[in-house]
Image (tube, helix red, strand yellow):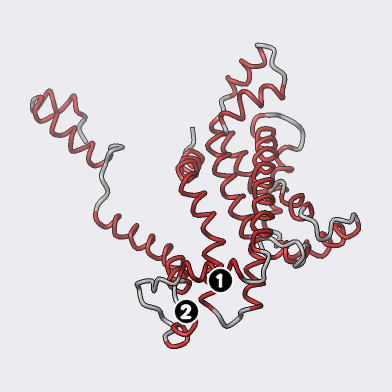
Amino acid sequence: MSSIPVIAQTAGKGAARSASRRRAKLAGPDRRPGWVTYLILGVVILISAYPIYYTLLLGSTTQTTIAANPVPSLIPDGKLFENFGRVFSSNIPLMQGFINSVIVASLQAVSVVIFSTLAGYSFAKLRFRGRGPLLVFVIATMAIPTQLGIVPLFIVMSEIGWSGKLIAVIVPGMVTAFGVFWMTQYLDSALPYELIEAARVDGASMIRTFWHIALPAARPAAAMLALFTFIGSWTAFFWPFIILGSNNPTLPMVIQLLNANYFTDYALIMSGVLLSTLPLIIVFIFAGRHLVAGIMQGAVKG
C-alpha cells in the first residue's frame, strides 16, 4: 500500500487527505466497530445479565405464583420489597453474616494486593538465584484443587484454636498465586528499570523504591486484583462453611441457612440471593472503571 506522501506527490494533496481518512477508519484508534461487533456484544451482555434478572423476577413474586408457573413473566410482580422485609424478619443472622463478609473480603483484598505486589516486584525486577523455578512453582500451585488442601488446613486451624473464628478464613487467603503471577506480569512490562536505577542513585532503599516507584506504577493492576479478590472472597462458601459453622457465618452461609429453613419458598430464597449480590453490583458500579483499566493495561505490553 502506498504511503500518504507518495500519494500526495502523484495524485495531489486532496487524494492524500482522502486516503488518510480511509486508512484512519480502517486501522486508527478511533475506528468505529461494525454492527456485527455490537450484535455479539449485545448477545454476550444479555446472556451475562439474564441470571441476575431471573433472580430479580423470582424474588419479586410469590411462591404460589412460582408453583403455578415456574417460568416467570419478563416483568417483575412488585413483591420484591415485601420479600426483602421477609428476609430481614426471618430467623437468620443476616447482619452478622454481612459484617463478617465485609471484614473478610476487605482484609483479604488489601492483604492480597500488598503481598502480591511485593512478590511481583521481586520476581519482575530483582535478580536472585532460583527466581525462575520459584515463580514456576508458585504458578503451578494454581493447578491444585482447593479441596485437596481442606483436610490438612482444617487440622492446622483446629490445632491452633482458630476453628470457628474469622481469622481462619482470612489468613489462608491473604496471598494468592494468581495475584503474584498477575502483578509479576504487569510490573515486568509497566515498570522500567531506569526508574529503579534512578531511585537507587538518589539513595532510596529497596523498600522506599518499592513504595514510591513500584506501587504507584502498579495501581491499575492492583485495583483490578483488589476487586477480583473482594468478589471471590465475598462469594466464597466452601471453606467458610467448613471452618466457621453456623454460629459465626458469612453472608453466603446465611443465605444457605435461609435455604435450609425455607427450602420450598423460592421467592424468599431468590430475594435473599439478590440482597447478597447488591453490594457487589454497587462496588462494581463505583470501581468498574479501574477494573477495566487494570485489565487493559495489564494486557498491553510496553
Name the residue: 80% across, 56% down.
165
Which residue is identified by label 2? 62
Q: Residue at x 8, y 25 (%)?
A: 12
Q: Which residue lies under the disc numbered 1?
A: 86
Identify the residue at the far right of this view: 159
Specify the amino acid type for callout 1: Arg
Residue 10: image location, x then y, percent: 10, 26
Q: Nearer the viewer, residue 153 or 60?
A: 60
Label 1 secondary element? helix
| Secondary structure under the numbered disc 2 in the rendered image | loop
| x then y, percent, for residue 34 | 24, 52
99 vs 178, nearest the viewer: 99
Indicate whether 171 appears above or below 125.
below
The residue mark sitting in front, 2 or 1, is 1
The structure residue drawn at horizontal position 44% and vertical position 71%, both measured from the top left corner, is 54
Q: Amino acid at mark 2?
A: Thr
Apparent side of residue 159 relative to residue 29 in the rendered image (left or right): right
Can you name the residue that lies furthest to the bottom here? 68
Q: Residue 168 occupies which quadrant of the picture?
A: bottom right
- The CA distance from mark 2 to mark 1 is 12 Å
x and y percentages locating residue 123 in the rendered image: 68, 35
Q: Residue at x 55, y 39 (%)?
A: 221
In the drawing, does residue 182 fall left or right of residue 70? right
Question: Could you classify mark 1 by the number of other residues whose Cα lies within 10 Å: few (under 14), some (14-19), or many (20 or more)?
Answer: some
Q: Is residue 40 above or below residue 80?
A: above
Q: Nearer the viewer, residue 74 or 236?
A: 74
- Vertical placement of residue 258 versus 235, above or below: below
- Say whether disc 2 or disc 1 marks the residue closer to the N-terminus: 2
Q: How many discs appear? A: 2
Q: Percent from the top left, x then y, of residue 153? A: 82, 59
Horizontal arrangement in the rendering, residue 73 relative to residue 143 (left or right):
left
The circle drawn on residue 110 is: none
